[in-house]
Amino acid sequence: MTPTDTTQPPDQPFPLARSCPFTEPEPYTRLREQQPVSKVRLRGGEQAWWVSGYAEARAVLADRRFSSDRRKDGYPNPNGDPRFRERFRTQPPPMVSLDGTEHAAVRRSVLGEFTLKRLSALRPRIQQIVDRFIDEMLACDSRPVDLVQALSLPVPSLVICELLGVPYEDHDCFQSRTAAMTRRTVPPAERLRAFDELQACLAALLTRKESEPGDDLLSRQIAQQREQGAVDHARLLSTATGLLVAGHETTANMITLGVLALLEHPGQRALLTEDPGSTPAAVEELLRFFSIGDTVIARVATEDVRVGGVTIKANEGVIVSVLSANRDPAAFDDPAELNPTRAARHHISFGYGPHQCLGQNLARLELRIVFDTLFRRIPGLRLAVPVDEIPFKTDATVYGAHELPVTW
Amino acid sequence: MRIEADTETCVGSGRCVLTEPAVFDQDDDGIVVLLTDRPAGRAAARARQAASLCPSRALRLMEP
């Protein structure tokens, strides 16, 4: 009998809400120690494999016998919202949901937009954008200021809009929809409507780019597709939506949590302000420490696979706990400590395997510029409320804070 | 040490270039380009790190 047959899934449905922004839920630690690949019950009632060890997580994510196709039977739905699942079945699969050569072809069509050379050419513009929003913060008469609305959301939003080629007069349409999609106070039905409206804005933009191309990602995608035969509208819309959504809230949450952590650890903040050369390592550590996309990575086995001492059978769902893998003491010494000088680059906060985040180096660049600039320009920045009064996104798919009131 | 880079499996994460730009580069499409296939000293150590970070396991190291 394999251990899987004897192990009872824990009573609580997974993933668990984070009760503290700085620690992993206690059952995560226990499961990882007992059995790094184990069965859990999800919120919707179904069971799935929970991969919590670092080595096991990398093994699963590099193994092409695990599929990313969320339309397949057995693909887990960790957050239990059937409306979104229905969407996945009725719309053309986004890049994150494709496998093998089909995935590689779509990824390669946009990869050239994210090379390190292209990104370093964007650096001065991102710096301007960050400076502009900090100027506005400093010019603001009333305090406290909500950092989420003043800096965390607008910076990545404007960066990705400009990269895609959204004209300035359309920024409001995009920013209000993306903001509505991520705001807790907006009811779910309205959030879905915001998503539909965002797609309508993007579809209109794509049509315009076909006749009036500019020097931007979407225009280059259209030109590339024309060269190959015909423009695939559905594919372009899916890619554009994916880039906009993926590049937006994730980076925003990391800005918010990173600023919070650095405000709470003045010694570590001093490291950064005294030596900006230390920022890249600090960014890697913050990415590891918060692991904001804890349960966004799921797979379904296409055949029986042996991993972490158990057999995952064909058609069984798998969730890779990014937070748990990034807190595995086998991969990181004293994993519960936030240590910006540690070597943390091997974290899996951007995933691992062929789907590893396409925009990861854009995110790194934005985070470095924001942290360096914010603490240099507002050295007296501090939290305006105690940490336990900050509304964290305790049960959102991507962790973060809804608001971060700051003053100086 | 000799390195081989598999441009078919490369997914263009750029992790190798960030780790050791003296050994690795990207072409305009984001795919890995080797600047040398025989790094020595610190570059060799960093090339090893790059191979362990590569998300698609596209880098192969051959010793010596």
Image (cartoon, coloured by chain):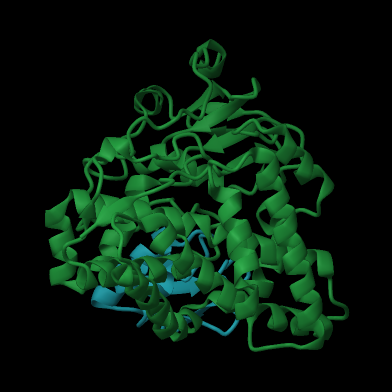
Chain colours: A green, B cyan
Residue farthest front in this picture: A141
Q: Quadrant of residue B61?
A: bottom left
Q: Position of residue A88 (x, y in %)?
A: 76, 45
Outermost residue, right side: A230
Residue B58 appears in the figure: yes
Q: Can you say whether A106 is above or below A383 in the image?
A: below
Residue at 56% in and 29% down: A49
Q: Give the number of marks.
A: 0
Q: Quadrant of the C terminus of chain A?
A: bottom left
Q: From the viewer's perspective, tell me whether residue A200 is left or right of residue A373.
A: right
- Which sits in the foreground, A213 or B29? A213
* Up/down of A196 relative to A117, above or below: above
Q: Position of residue B43 (x, y in %)?
A: 29, 76
Whether residue A339 is visible to the viewer of this picture, yes or no, is no
Q: Picture coordinates of residue A297 (x, y %)?
A: 56, 44
Image quadrant holding the N terminus of chain A, namely top right
The residue lying at 21 percent from left, 72 percent from top is: A376
Q: Residue at point 68% right, 62% down? A: A241
B41 in relation to B11, above or below: below
Which residue is nearer to you in this view: A390 or A356? A390
Front in this rendered view, residue A41 or A241: A241
* Residue A288 or residue A201, whichever sits in front: A201
Residue displayed at 79% across by 71% down: A204
Image-based side of A126 in relation to A375, left or right: right
Question: What x and y, as percent, mark residue A159?
Answer: 51, 73
Quarter-of-image position of residue A275: bottom left
User: Which of the 4 quarters of the picture holds residue A21?
Assistant: top left
